Image: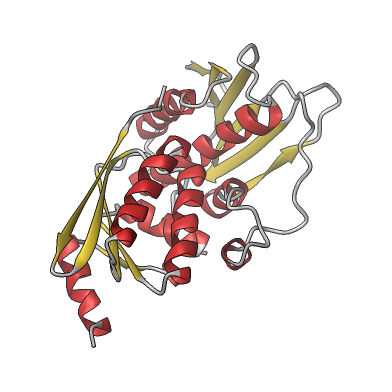
Amino acid sequence: MLEDDLTVTTRDQDGVAIIDLVGDVTTFAEDKINNAYREVTNTGARFVLLNFRQNDYINSAGIAILIGIVTEVNRNNQKLAVSGLSQHFQKIFRMVGLAQYADIYQTEEEALSGFDRFRG
Amino acid sequence: MTASPATTMSMELTLPNQLGYELIARDAIAAFARRLGMPMDRVDDMKTALCEACINAIEHGNLLNPDLRVHILCHVDAERFVIEVYDQGLRRFVPPSSLPNIADKLNGTGSLRGMGLLLISQLSDESGFVPRDEAGNCFRFAFQRSGAAHGCR
């Protein structure tokens, strides 16, 4: 029922690799999200923003995918941020501990500004 | 939806044992909760907790067998909104010895999955498996109807 309810695209904005996640983030999202992350990493991205939109459903399987991304981000010495989540899913991210490893911003613009403190 | 003279209301749903149907249950229970005046933030908590309980039943209780069913019983009184999720129990659930930890997952000593029960316990006011004599698991979780907003605990 859920197999194809997520659209994942990538773009660059001010040196930040933005991965737009539009739709539900569930177990069926794994290949799309991992492929997008590999794509931006292969182009040398140092800053990665997961930009969520229209996410009515993010479940624990989707969170597991994102924890996998955090693992890779740490391994590759990148910086990760998250934007666009509803208040409820921001709370969920804090509950599972993802907020310890990725700054959470309300908007894409705030997230892009947030990366400035890491630029040397 | 049924109401007894003791002002207890109840609703039952039976779902195919297939990932995705938890969303049908989620929307039905959310509509029920909204009609009963639950605050929106608690309805959001309930939606996530219900989906996680259904996923556990589908994946771990019924082992993704498409011939089985997941049954949901929701009963509400003046104090509490209680949801029970039943599977047909191909495998008896054995609770983990400790709650999952993201640090363990990141350093590779823990599975990336397994956050569902943690989320349910954080989002609801009480939760746990109900001992049963017959086959199948029953997971119960409840929300106080006073509806105080939950922060991250």
Residue positioned 48% across, 69% down in the render: A75
Residue sticking out furthest to the right? B133
Image quarter of the N terminus of chain A = top left
Residue positioned 29% across, 58% down in the render: A40
Q: Quadrant of residue A73?
A: bottom left
Q: Quadrant of residue B59?
A: top right
Image quarter of the C terminus of chain A = bottom left
Residue sticking out furthest to the top? B67
Please tell me which residue lies in front, A90 or B122: A90
Q: Position of residue A106 (x, y in %)?
A: 23, 62
Position of A112 relative to A56 (above/below)? below
Q: Position of residue B87 (x, y in %)?
A: 68, 24
Residue positioned 52% across, 42% down in the render: B49
Q: Position of residue B29 (x, y in %)?
A: 45, 28
Residue sticking out furthest to the bottom? A120
Position of B93 relative to A4 (above/below)? below
